[in-house]
Image (cartoon, rainbow, N blue to C red):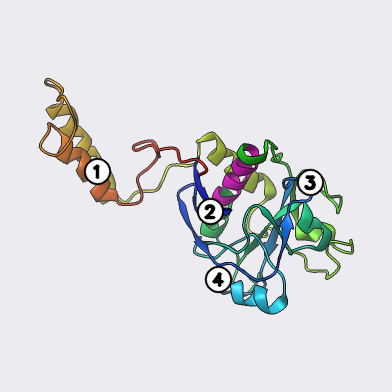
Amino acid sequence: MTYKLEGGWLSSVCGIDVTRRPVRHFGGPWPDGHPIGYLFHYTAGCGSDISDVLDDRGISVHFSVDREGRVYEYVPVTNVAFHAFEASFVCWGVEHNASPGTCDLTDRQLAASARLTAGLVELTKRRWGFHIPLRKTRGPELVPGFKDHADGTTSTWNDNGHTDRLYMWTWDRYLSEVRAVLDGEEDEVSLTPEQEDAIKFAFGQLRFLEGGPSPVEPGPGRRGWRFAKRISEAIGESVPSQIMPMTEETEK
């Protein structure tokens, strides 16, 4: 589970690139020193980058996730975003591009959201020493954990009646996905039959060729190197962590 952070801006999180789109309206540092929870929103729109909409409305969120699983950041992680009145001062705000019944939330989107959320939970722990509990909390009380925006309906932090919620998934499923990413136990990447055949062939050749004396250093021209290289070329960016573990990246 990795993320890359530079000056309050993520460039990647758990294998997903993050696109920076700074907006004009956001607050200062977290009043309590760090966020204590996470607030799930959907946009009631079907687009992707929402920076123009946020600027026009004079509001902000930390991140959005579009229906293809692309992630955008609008506010530095060190600062408050204006997404839910008083809840803004204690919660990460994450929008999800969707309008239920018109352009629904997608599995790809929610899976990417879970990876982003795992990164935010880990970032909060590493940077501030606070662990956001992986639990769905009910009602408008601003306590540590996860909330739908709908939980605040008629409260001081959601007086517009906009009932954001997961719709496509349950909270149990969403938080299980987050937990799996944090534990390094997310589901295996789906591969095509051609990719599976390439992996089996490459590993078979690798085991055969490397049955003899081991080379002093791996590299081009060394025993089995071209076959190991063929694995990554065959399956591109879909390399499962079980085959090629991601090197850990920490905050810079």
Query: Element under label 2?
Result: strand
Say which amino acid is labelled 1: Ile
State left or right for residue 156 relative to residue 209.
right
Instruction: Please state the horizontal and vertical placement of residue 122, each as a whole percent of the image.
Output: 60, 40
Q: Which residue is mark 2?
A: 10
Type of secondary structure dominating the magenta stretch: helix
Q: Which residue is mark 1?
A: 231
Give the distance between the C-alpha atoms of the residues marked 1 and 3, in whole angstroms: 48 Å
Evaluate if marks 1 and 2 touch, with contact meaning CB atoms under 8 Å apart: no
- Which tag is nearer the camera, tag 1 or tag 2? 2
Evaluate if marks 3 and 4 touch, with contact meaning CB atoms under 8 Å apart: no
Q: Please provide the residue range marked out in magenta.
A: 115-125
Q: Which residue is mark 4?
A: 49
Query: Element under label 3?
Result: loop
Between 98 and 24, the one nearer to me in the picture:
24
Evaluate if marks 3 and 2 touch, with contact meaning CB atoms under 8 Å apart: no
Looking at the rendered structure, which numbered label has been put on residue 32?
3
Earlier-in-chain disc, 1 versus 3: 3
Between 237 and 53, the one nearer to me in the picture:
53
Say which amino acid is labelled 3: Asp
Looking at the rendered structure, which numbered label has been put on residue 97?
none
- Which tag is nearer the camera, tag 1 or tag 4? 4
Give the distance between the C-alpha atoms of the residues marked 1 and 2, in whole angstroms: 29 Å
Query: Quadrant of residue 41 in the image?
Result: bottom right
Can you name the residue that lies furthest to the bottom here? 56
Say which amino acid is labelled 4: Asp
